[in-house]
Image: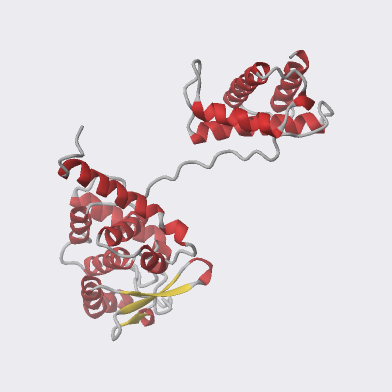
Amino acid sequence: MADVQRAIRTYLDHLAVERGLATNTLTSYRRDLRRYLEHLAAQGIDDLDAVTEATVTGFLVSLREGDAEHPPLSSTSAARTVVAVRGFHKFAVADGLATVDPASGVKPPAPAKRLPKALPLADVEAILEAAGAPGTTLALRDRALLEVLYGTGARISEAVGLDVDDLDGVDGTVLLRGKGSKERIVPVGSYARTAVDEYLVRGRPELAAVSTGSTNGGALFLNARGGRLSRQSAWAVLVKAADRAGVTKDVSPHTLRHSFATHLLDGGADVRVVQELLGHASVTTTQVYTLVTVDNLREVFATAHPRARD
């Protein structure tokens, strides 16, 4: 294994001197490549040109499965180790230490999908009720904004980008402009329509009147100076409402979007309908929400079914 060990030392020197990697990063590379060296030794491989793609793939499998000396690695940790191995073999070929790169075709494992965070309906309702300082013009705007975010599943950029003309009061719909300028028409529920109507009648005219000559382009949601509300200010509206409502979880505009989708699926909506409402190009993106509802079902099953308990 002397030649392989020398090649690894040369690669680590390259990372330290020529690429200037941080000490902690180098320590991680050294640990990962030491484990790779142990794997090669166990396979009886002492020549880099004897390493095949199957060898590297087998190493990845061993990382995920673990052994007597090593616990199984998560997909994230295994991916980091495979990246180190891929970098080593690529360097070995470029530096003339090997003639083939057996790791180029081995892809690091995809990280586990993080389930979207969804708030319980009671928390959402508490946040909506707490929108804005009571009795103020901005309270009307804030309530309308949050009702639209939760009631349509709009992204924050889509909500603040709305113009008054994007609302169709007859059909009860709103035109949202999503990523890549893609447009979609989404129904607006009665609560959101009521909140928006109250804002348009009693709130927006007052905000528009204080404008100092700057045009708002017909924006639906205005700031205190009569201009279009920014994403940052809309975010602050939600955070303040959550704080007033005593909702201590991390809350963001995307949390309301996640809650919108999850509550629809919990209520029996078809995943493809939710896909259209969210403006996802692929149903695969939307299907992550079904994992949330499956967890819900599993929890209910575990507590309610007489044969589900241990």
Q: How is the image coloured?
A: secondary structure
* Quarter of the image where one finds residue 154: bottom left
At x 26%, y 76%, the residue is 206
Q: Position of residue 249 (x, y in %)?
A: 27, 45
Q: Is 260 on the left or on the right of 306, as rendered? A: right
Q: How many marks?
A: 0
Q: Is 53 on the left or on the right of 70, as rendered? A: right
Of residues 274 and 191, the one nearer the viewer is 274
Q: On the rendered image, what quadrant is the C terminus found in? A: top left
At x 19%, y 35%, the residue is 309
Q: Position of residue 140 (x, y in %)?
A: 22, 69
Of residues 54 and 231, the one nearer the viewer is 54
* Quarter of the image where one finds residue 142: bottom left
In the displayed orientation, state which residue is furthest to the front.
Answer: 307
Q: Position of residue 167 (x, y in %)?
A: 34, 80
In the displayed orientation, state which residue is furthest to the bottom.
Answer: 170
* Quarter of the image where one finds residue 286: bottom left
Of residues 233 and 74, the one nearer the viewer is 74
